[in-house]
Image (cartoon, helix red, strand yellow):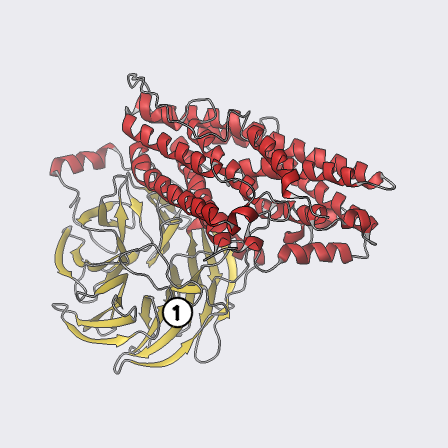
Amino acid sequence: MKIQNKILAPILTGLLLTGCGGGGSTDSPITPTPDTTPAPQTSTMDEQFGKYLNDLADSHILPGYALLLQNAQALNDKAATFCGLNEPSDVDLHLLQLSWLELSLQWQTMQWIKVGAIGQNNRALRLEFWPDSQNAVDKGLAALLGSVENVDAEYVASHNVGGQGIPALEILLFDNALLLTGDDRVKRCEVLQAISTNVVNIAAEVNQAWSPQGGNFVAEFKQGSGRFSSRQDAVEELVTNWLEQLERIKDEKILVPLGDSAPGQLLRSEFYLSHSSLAAIKINLQLFMDIYQAGSGHGFDDILQLHLEQDNIAASMNERLLSLQNHVLAIQGTMEDALQDESARAQLKELIAAIQDFRTVLTADFVQALDINIGFNSNDGD
Amino acid sequence: MNRRSFILGATALGVLSAFGTRHWFKAAQGQLLAGACSDSQNNHYVGAFDQSGKLICQVPIAARGHGVIDHPNKPGHGLVIGRSPGYVAYEVDFIQGSIRAQLSPAQDHHFYGHGQFSPDGQYFITTEQNVTTGQGLIVIRESQHYQVVAQYDSGGIGPHEALFLPDGHTLVIANGGILTHPDKPKAKLNLDTMAPNLSYMDIRSGEIINSTTPSHHQLSIRHLAIDSSGKVYGGMQYQGANTELLPLAFSHQGAGPLQPLNATAALWRQMQQYTASLCVDNASKTLAISCPRSDMITFWDITTDSFISQVQLRDGAGLARASSGIVATSGKGKAWFGDKSEQVFSNIRWDNHLALISS
């Protein structure tokens, strides 16, 4: 059984409304409301960057990773309950799918971050191995399902990286209804629980590394110490992460699936089995405003306007971020729908143009105003 | 690692202010290290520093530079080539901090950012593109006035770095395979059909005497290093997905296929499909490969072609071998002198490559 688009659509909409730190998003076009309050420059850029890093960590990164762990644990618990049922129903499977969606979409809010523990020991790839032109996820999952050994989280973590994370769980949960009807239902449940526990473990490691009570990477991050040479260095790395995510959305999440003509290449979109590819992109792009504004804290907008008195650049950034949201929210349905519909394909192309427009301002006016260096060789080498 | 860092702060800035330009700091003696660089306001320069980390000069240039080449006939001089699509190259006197000559490609050509003097010093060779046809070219100029004396088909599209074998007449060419056009400098126009290769050209005739392709058609061969035995090392940039696992560096000598260097899957993955510069230190039998996307400089044993170790250098890319060993520079303005020291230059972003300049 495949979940039908019409069933998932309202669920995805609901998740989207809460997926970026408390909602506020609507499907209606957003009107820019530039804040033009002037204020004198009273602190150094180091202090400004410090405020930004502090607020971004407290309002987005720490709670975001905590929610990722919470959602991973919830899925893990529900998988255990599901697998304990003698005769699980469609509804039981549907509830499990929803739990996976909450986890997957929360991951989309954190996917842009590469600094810290997520960037070490292949954790990001283990959570989501994608794009997957070599079918590593299929192969990894097939190996787990075919194993005669008992498959637990430790076993998963030591085997094919493709079978360790959210895409492998998507196949188990959304590719037909083999968890309900398959002859190997018991083994599938064993693997489902093992992979979901592995995801919990990865999310827990990342939380532990950032936590003030654990590895306290958050202190290094806020102070620009440890692996960072300064607060500016930390900001530069974050903005580089942001730019890389922007490129990834444009190229891998939109351009490749779009292909040359309808119906595009749906199988190369991110989460096509669960029909959540477009929802993921919406969350990615809505999250950009949080990155820019440090949630509701001392954001880049404040630095530009209140410290640097660069109101024009702040307005330009704000306008383009809102344009991104307006463009992506205007695309209805799922990616599968959009790829087949000429008017929706045109909307996707307009979204790509809006992303390119934003990239231009981000990499030119924005970085020059902040006097930061975003991956000179790593992103613009030759 | 015992590191000591310096920040060129008030002193250097004072010197800059005193001269009103950023051309000249002091006369230099001994070996210099030179690289293209930019500042935070996107002004472009070619700069040189000595092995104590003292900035010797920072010469403004019109556009972003890329490779720098030591001039074999003029101590303290070198050439910096415009980054692709480059339309100018400069001969620079690094001791005086001045531009001595300027050369441009033909009207329908552009530079790819790299060049090389012939071992006898008589000729200067650049990799270029014929924009009309897309064909890669090896263009040969005499080294006095840089007048073109010959040009040959490079054996592929997108020739990037080219170096001579120790025999003095075989030019090894990294044909990256990516078709570009100056109208859209960032666009890669043939990702599905690109065909990179490593070509060997007899520079006396322009004949391609050997050509070898990498294991995947999207593995763009970009940069090279050659050891004293004539073994060629290549660094590649993969144009496919980040999740795919492919060795990004190889060795090659004589006939046969490119041989991937020996490293774990985790290390190749860590490189994020990108290498920047390569540099061989024959004395220590070591190859260095910079990997700016993973903020590391990797070291390899050239007797076994195996990975040895790595050091962290944020956005590190430039590599050169000085008398003290391998030196690396970064887009964060840092120069790394092995275990001995490192230096941070204020408001300088060192570009992809670094060269040793004899003076």
Q: Is residue A367 above or below residue B62?
A: above
- Residue A149 visible within the image: yes
Name the residue nearer the viewer: A28 or B228: A28
Name the residue nearer the viewer: A280 or B81: A280
Q: Is residue A309 above or below residue B185?
A: above
At horizontal 66% and vertical 38% (from top left) the residue drawn is A7
Q: Is residue A269 above or below residue B132?
A: above
Residue B96: horizontal and vertical position, in percent? 14, 51
Secondary structure state at the residue bearing disc 1: loop
Residue A153: horizontal and vertical position, in percent? 73, 45
**Which residue is under mark 1?**
B227
Name the residue nearer the viewer: A71 or B139: A71
At horizontal 21% and vertical 35% (from top left) the residue drawn is B13
Residue B297: horizontal and vertical position, in percent? 44, 53
Residue A180: horizontal and vertical position, in percent? 80, 46
Q: Quadrant of residue A291?
A: top left
Quadrant into which the C terminus of chain B falls: bottom left
- Residue A208 visible within the image: no
Amino acid type indicated by mark 1: Asp
Q: How many marks?
A: 1
Q: Is residue A205 left or right of residue A251?
A: right
- Mark 1 crowd level (few <14, some 14–19, many ≥20, 10 Å Cα): some
At horizontal 36% and vertical 44% (from top left) the residue drawn is B342
Name the residue nearer the viewer: A54 or B219: B219
Task: Identify the chain of the residue marked 1, using the numbered disc in the image.
Answer: B
